[in-house]
Image (tube, rainbow, N blue to C red):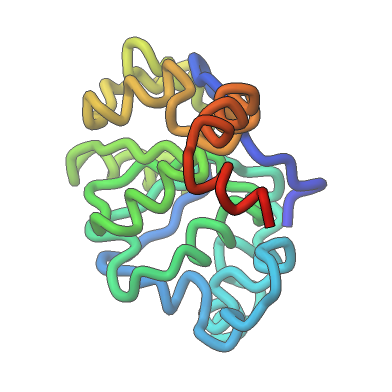
């Protein structure tokens, strides 16, 4: 895990971070967070268990265990990432390890939606560009700055136009993805609506 967990909030305009590469197609949610960890009461402990089986098998050589990747927050992946079951624990575990954004060839639909719902933007690039980025990371540290308005990821010597659904882009730019904060900010409107509901008034008499 990377430091103290701080959940994202509100609007996104720019995001900076160190990249970590995870090579392989069809990496499913059971590999991201094995089923035995789903019995947790909350998500706070999941970061230390992300890719638990893969990390044990590789005995310290998994990308999420390498010292060179400490502090990384932008995950670079291949195709159909997050396939398999719809468990929301998968993006929650990635976030609590330290991942703030994912760039990949493609994502499973439900995993993609679960990521957006908790503030992890998922961008796409072509297979050849993803491969070139992963090869770059094999030889040198890579830090990206992501411009959400222009959908561009850039470093000192690399620059890419990222793909993202227009509706998703608007959600991050406006902060609409953060439904919890929107509800809290509009608490007065919620209470007014509750007071206007006839069945709430009726029940309050008991």
Q: Where is residue 197 in the image (x, y as percent from the top left)?
A: 48, 38
Q: In this view, does 167 lie to the left or right of 113?
A: left
Q: What percent of the width, then of the height, locates residue 195?
A: 58, 32
Q: In which quarter of the image is the C terminus?
A: bottom right
- The answer to whether residue 140 is visible is no
The residue drawn where x is 43% and y is 48% is 115
Residue 141: x and y, percent? 57, 37
* Residue 82 visible here: yes
> Horizontal placement of 170 versus 55: left or right?
left
**Camera-side residue of 147 and 91:** 91
Identify which residue is drawn at 43% across, 16% down.
174
In percent of width and height, residue 106 lies at 23, 50
Q: Which of the 4 image quadrants contains residue 161?
A: top left
Q: Quadrant of residue 52?
A: bottom right
Query: Which residue corresponds to the image point at 36% horizontal and 40% vertical from the top-left?
Result: 122
Looking at this view, name the residue that lies furthest to the right. 4
131 relative to 87 in the view: left or right: left
Front in this rendered view, residue 176 or 150 = 176
The image quadrant where one finds the N terminus is: bottom right
Q: In the rendered view, would you say 74 is above or below 115? A: above
- Residue shown at 44% from the left, 44% from the top: 117
Q: Quick check: 74 above or below 203? A: above
Give the number of marks.
Answer: 0
């Amino acid at each position: 895990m990377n430091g103290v967990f701080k959940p994202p909030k509100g609007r996104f305009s720019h995001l900076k971070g160190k990249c970590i590469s995870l090579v392989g197609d069809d990496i499913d949610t059971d590999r991201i967070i094995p089923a035995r960890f789903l019995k947790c009461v909350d998500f706070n402990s999941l970061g230390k268990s992300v890719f638990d089986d893969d990390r044990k098998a590789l005995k310290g050589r998994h990308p999420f265990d390498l010292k060179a990747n400490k502090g990384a927050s932008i995950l670079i992946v291949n195709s159909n990432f997050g396939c398999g079951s719809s468990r929301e624990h998968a993006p929650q575990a990635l976030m609590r390890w330290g991942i703030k954004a994912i760039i990949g060839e493609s994502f499973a639909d439900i995993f993609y939606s679960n990521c957006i719902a908790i503030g992890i933007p998922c961008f796409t690039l072509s297979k050849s560009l993803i491969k070139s980025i992963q090869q770059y990371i094999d030889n040198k540290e890579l830090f990206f700055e992501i411009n959400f308005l222009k959908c561009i990821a850039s470093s000192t010597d690399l620059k890419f136009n990222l793909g993202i659904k227009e509706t998703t882009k608007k959600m991050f730019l406006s902060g609409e993805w953060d439904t919890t904060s929107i509800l809290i900010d509009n608490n007065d409107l919620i209470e007014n609506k509750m007071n206007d509901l006839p069945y709430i008034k009726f029940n309050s008499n008991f």
